[in-house]
């Protein structure tokens, strides 16, 4: 049976108009004023916006870190995504040292397949580069539908790669149609600063931020951009947290270099004063990069508005305060890095961005969905509301107000970074490929319906495709 969503306002990255949307099977088959046919089911979207389902390009589910693993796995993480209005996530399949990329992919399929409530793809996070891994990058992973890589310039002796590795991967990515994502912080400098702090007996959570100052992000961002320019390759800078790093991206873009920036809700909405929290609870905010002085937030919002930043990812990487974060109770450098956010990314961006008058509805859709679909080889199947696209649609009721709290969240972690924050608007329904998976905040189905997404190479659209980013 086909379904018609009636009376809503369709919002894409470029348009805003009232129309009914007819869904048949997994696809949108008609958009217009009189699209229903005899026997169609009708769902009232009166007074609501119809947004393309959110795309979160940055999650870490079921990720082993040191002696522990992230609190959310694919089951809880994607349930949280769905109720929040996100219908696609791209997670980081992370290579262990000595492992092939094919093995890393197999590991991540085992974690995700049959457990995901939203559609999912993988970036490959590379930690150990050798000749055979370079060969895999050129062929194997693209055949598996993976068209982006992640490299870390931080986490010395664990994930950090040197400049020669980064440059070689960028050179190869250009030929192979891959988009390289980079975590930009100078891991060597951080290592020295952390040792100094510990030697002085500075062990509280706030020293995490003091030992990762903005300049280590700015330097690494600039260096990564230079290496991308040498290679003639595009680059995606993950979790931009500071005005200084953003400035490096803006300068490169003004020279016509294909550099794309992502920021996260935590850098838009929280600031370094969180580290003054009582006792050990400041550990909730231990993430990398750390939260910054408040003035950076306005710069990041401006970057989203003027297109210098393309996406907002959650960087969902959750650890319980009790039992996980407290591994670092007597040493800040042992606190697992990261925080939750996949459930709240979409709603917070709407509330603070659209509700706060900082971005338009079209910009909201571009940042929350469309641009990630374009950059990561999913457009136009994902990321828009158009005939022929997957029926991933959020019926968003802007009149509902709610309060974010760990007590009511689907994320399986013992805190929420935005506890007590008011959210404007909520999904009345969420559709995943035509299936109504969420109604009024509740999952309709016990069975996970998410599919693995085979993504197109970056070069398929290349510069032409991406020059169309909003
Ligand atoms: Zn991350």
Image: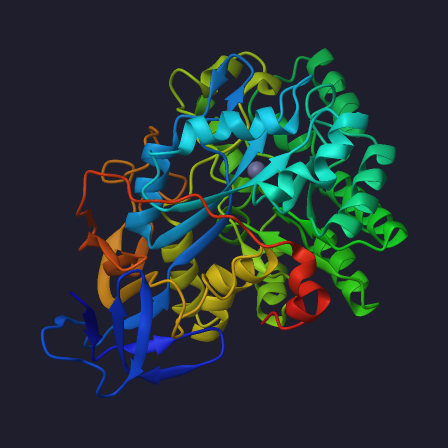
Task: Report the residue at 79% width, 40% height from top.
Answer: 169
Of 470 and 423, nearer the camera is: 470
So how many labels did they put on this image? Answer: 0
**Image quarter of residue 354:** bottom left
Most foreground residue, 57 or 342: 57
Q: In which quarter of the image is the C terminus?
A: bottom right
Above or below, comparing residue 201 to residue 209 in the picture: above
Q: In this view, does 68 lie above or below 207?
A: above
Q: Is residue 365 left or right of residue 295?
A: left
Frontmost residue, 367 versus 136: 136
Question: x, y percentage for residue 133?
Answer: 74, 29
Applied colour scheme: rainbow
Residue 81: percent from the left, percent from the top?
36, 46
Outermost bottom residue:
33
Residue occupying the point 32% across, 73% down: 29
Q: Which residue lies furthest to the left in this view?
A: 39
Residue 195 image position (x, y, % from top left): 74, 16
Q: Can you say which quadrant of the picture contains the N terminus?
A: bottom left
Kindly indicate the quadrant of the structure image that contains residue 41. bottom left
Residue 270 in view here? no
Q: How far from the left and from the top, in percent, is residue 303?
A: 63, 64
Q: Please say if 224 is above or below 400.
A: above
Q: In this orientation, does residue 191 appear?
A: yes
The residue positioned 38% from the left and 45% from the top of the image is 451
- Residue sitting at 25 percent across and 74 percent down? 22
Q: In this view, does 141 lie to the left or right of 449?
A: right
Residue 70 lies in quadrant: top left
Q: Residue furthest right?
A: 230
Image quarter where ligand 1 lies: top right
């Amino acid at each position: 049976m086909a379904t018609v969503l009636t009376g809503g306002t369709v919002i894409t990255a470029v348009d805003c108009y009232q129309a009914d949307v007819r869904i048949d099977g997994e696809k949108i088959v008609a958009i217009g004023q009189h699209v229903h046919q005899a026997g169609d089911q009708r769902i009232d979207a009166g007074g609501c916006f119809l947004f393309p389902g959110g795309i979160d390009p940055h999650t870490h589910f079921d990720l082993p870190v040191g002696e522990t693993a992230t609190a959310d796995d694919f089951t809880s993480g994607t349930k949280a995504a769905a109720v929040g209005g996100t219908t696609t996530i791209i997670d980081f399949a992370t290579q262990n040292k000595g492992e092939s990329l094919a093995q890393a992919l197999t590991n991540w399929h085992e974690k995700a397949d049959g457990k995901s409530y939203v559609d999912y793809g993988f970036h490959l996070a590379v930690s150990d580069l050798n000749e055979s891994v370079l060969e895999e990058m050129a062929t194997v992973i693209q055949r598996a539908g993976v068209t982006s890589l992640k490299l870390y310039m931080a986490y010395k002796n664990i994930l950090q790669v040197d400049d020669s590795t980064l440059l070689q991967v960028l050179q190869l990515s250009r030929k192979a149609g891959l988009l390289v994502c980079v975590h930009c912080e100078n891991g060597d400098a951080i290592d020295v600063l952390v040792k100094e702090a510990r030697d002085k007996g500075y062990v509280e959570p706030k020293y995490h931020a003091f030992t990762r100052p903005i300049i280590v992000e700015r330097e690494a961002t600039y260096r990564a951009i230079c290496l991308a320019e040498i290679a003639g390759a595009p680059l995606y800078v993950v979790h931009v947290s500071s005005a200084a790093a953003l400035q490096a991206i803006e300068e490169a873009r003004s020279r016509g270099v294909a550099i794309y920036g992502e920021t996260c809700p935590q850098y838009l909405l929280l600031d370094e004063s969180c580290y003054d929290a009582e006792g050990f609870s400041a550990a909730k905010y231990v993430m990398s990069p750390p939260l910054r002085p408040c003035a950076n937030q306005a710069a990041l919002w401006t970057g989203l508005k003027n297109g210098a930043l393309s996406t907002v990812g959650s960087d969902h990487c959750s650890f319980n305060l009790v039992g996980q974060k407290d591994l670092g109770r007597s040493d800040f450098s042992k606190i697992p890095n990261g925080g939750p956010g996949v459930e709240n990314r979409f709603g917070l961006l709407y509330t603070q961005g659209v509700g706060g008058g900082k971005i338009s509805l079209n910009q909201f859709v571009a940042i929350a969905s469309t641009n990630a679909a374009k950059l990561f080889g999913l457009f136009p199947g994902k990321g828009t509301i158009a005939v022929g696209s997957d029926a991933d649609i959020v019926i968003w009721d802007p009149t509902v107000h709610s309060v974010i709290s760990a007590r009511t969240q689907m994320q399986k972690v013992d805190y929420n970074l935005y506890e007590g924050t008011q959210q404007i608007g909520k999904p009345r329904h969420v559709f995943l490929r035509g299936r109504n998976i969420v109604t009024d905040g509740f999952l309709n189905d016990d069975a996970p319906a998410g599919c693995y997404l085979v993504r197109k190479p970056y070069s398929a659209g290349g510069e032409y495709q991406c020059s169309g980013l909003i």
